[in-house]
Image: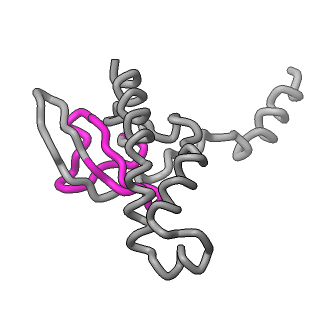
């Protein structure tokens, strides 16, 4: 009788590799914003960012949910990070700043409210581009 297979079996005892157990769920607080059938729209913080997504209602544990389940949910809203670079027409900025009496950095610092209102006025064109982008994303 060949004992080699038995020796190999003995050697392998206790060295069997086992699958690592699943990490415990990381529960995060959620706020339920809406319910629709078996789905819920929730809001939660992840990495200091407020996020919203649709998840099955059964993933909620009181006012908490597993972060992995939330990440796998259907995102809600427009991904504004995909909008690209936004800019203001520099000629229009020059014209509007001078119209508001802002010629120097000292003027800019001395009149922050006027500067912000002037920039907000110019942001109208940026807002139009954002609305167009959002509609394209939602289509």
Quadrant of the drawing holding the C terminus: top left
Say whether residue 41 is magenta: no
* Residue 94 screen position, x and y as percent: 57, 55
Residue visible at 53% across and 73% down? 108
- In this rendering, the answer to whether 54 lies above or below 137 is below
Look at the image and give the residue range highlighted in magenta: 43-69
Side of 117 where 37 appears, left or right: left
* Residue 86 screen position, x and y as percent: 54, 42
Residue visible at 35% across and 32% down? 131
Question: What main secondary structure does the magenta stretch of the protein show?
Answer: strand
Q: Can you tell which quarter of the image residue 113 is in? A: bottom left
Side of 110 where 14 appears, left or right: right
Front position in the image: 92 or 47:
92
* Residue 48 screen position, x and y as percent: 44, 61
- In this rendering, the answer to whether 67 lies above or below 38 is below
Front position in the image: 107 or 136:
107
Residue visible at 12% across and 30% down? 36
Protein image colouring = one colour
Residue visible at 42% across and 43% down? 68
Any part of residue 27 in sight: no
Q: Can you tell which quarter of the image residue 87 is in? A: top right
Quadrant of the drawing holding the N terminus: top right
* Residue 83 screen position, x and y as percent: 51, 35
Any part of residue 127 in sight: yes
Front position in the image: 56 or 75:
75
- In this rendering, the answer to whether 32 lies above or below 10 is below
Say whether residue 58 is magenta: yes
- In this rendering, the answer to whether 132 lies above or below 115 is above
């Amino acid at each position: 009788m060949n004992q080699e297979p038995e020796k190999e079996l003995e050697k392998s005892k206790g060295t069997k590799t086992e699958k690592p157990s699943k990490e415990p769920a990381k529960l995060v607080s959620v706020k339920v914003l809406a319910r629709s059938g078996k789905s819920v729209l929730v809001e939660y913080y992840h990495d200091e960012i407020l996020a919203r997504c649709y998840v099955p209602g059964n993933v909620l544990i009181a006012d908490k949910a597993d972060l992995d389940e939330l990440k796998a949910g259907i995102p809600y809203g427009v991904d504004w990070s995909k909008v690209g670079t936004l800019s203001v027409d520099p000629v229009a900025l020059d014209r509007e700043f001078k119209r508001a009496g802002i010629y120097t950095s000292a003027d800019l610092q001395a009149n922050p409210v006027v500067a912000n209102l002037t920039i907000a006025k110019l942001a109208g064109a940026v807002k139009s581009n954002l609305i167009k982008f959002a509609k394209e994303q939602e289509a």
